[in-house]
Amino acid sequence: MKVLVADDDFGSRLVAQAAVEQSGHDCIVAADGTSAWELYQRNRPEVVVTDLMMPGLDGLDLCRAIRSAEEDSYTYLVLVTSKDSHADVVAGMEAGADDYVAKPLDPFTLHTRLLVAQRVTSLHADLARYREALAEQARTDPLTKLHNRLKLAEDLEELHDRSARYGTDYSVAICDVDNFKSYNDLYGHQAGDAALQAVANSLASEGRKSDGIYRFGGEEFVLLLPGQRVTGAETRLLRALESIRSLDIAHSGNPSGTLTVCAGVSAYVSGHRVSSERLLKEADMALYSAKNAGRNRLEIAPEVRHIVRS
């Protein structure tokens, strides 16, 4: 582990450092609370052993600062005090300390505290990994392994806010597998699932790393295209539609005889700085127009169609 020792007393600092290093851990030392806080922010140690009374930030203030700065990680805090009173112990725990030791510091006592700290921080690290995995699972479509509507809502809000702040462009596309209900009726839901997976893989393989691709629900997919104006989005989607046609998945219920997709596109561009909700609505209406026009095609929202020609 990485252990930060903060103590203004040189002798106590040396004893603590020797105990930490003899326990097999890396040690960082600070002679006051202010420098300890700076070292903590720079190094993010797993354990902090801090004196109660120090110049600058005292031990209680340092504990509070560390607790307020933590996000997914957890720092085990040990308070060292020569005032071994109930009031000091309670004050330390209320400030965020996990344990305390009294001066003069006993190396064996600190060694035992570090053993406990290692177990606790390891458990917190495991919990952080589990939380991260669960958060990713909650934002992933189990069938296609694309991101889902929850992740779309988060990413679209972030992209829209960033684009509004810096005046950059982006496009939104909604894709729909043509006559997918009849595909399921003809070939069964297992084949339908396989077809959706193939479409998802094709959409993902045709894009840039910065593009966001999401299963919107059923047979619908949404694409977020950062930095793309209408012409770039049109080129990207036409290539995607052709890639799906080239899969040559038989679909006797479709006029073409193979599985196809139609799409609608809108864009957040100069002259059309509207809300993200409106962009999604415009892309959805353009998709509806593509369906009415015979499917297996792309339609640009009329609100931005003139930008393609400019």
Image: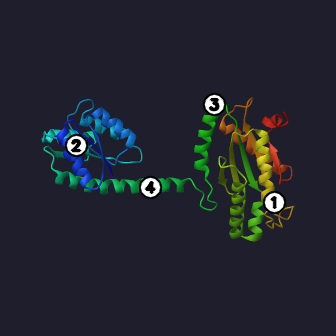
Residue type at mark 1 is Arg
* Mark sitting on residue 79: 2
What secondary structure is marked by label 4? helix
Question: What's the residue at 22%, 43% (across, down)?
Answer: 79
Kindly state the secondary structure of the residue where label 2 is placed. Answer: strand
Q: Is residue 94 above or below residue 128?
A: above
Disc 3/disc 1 C-alpha distance (Å): 37 Å
Give the percent coordinates (x, y) of residue 197: 68, 62
* Foreground tag (1 vs 2): 2
What label does residue 166 carry, if any?
A: 3
Which callout, 3 or 1, points to the residue nearer the camera?
Answer: 3
Residue 292 x/y as whole percent: 84, 49
Of the numbered discs in the image, which one, if any, rests on residue 245? 1
Residue 96 relative to residue 148: left or right: left
Q: Position of residue 189 (x, y in %)?
A: 69, 68
| Residue type of the residue flagged with mark 3 | Tyr
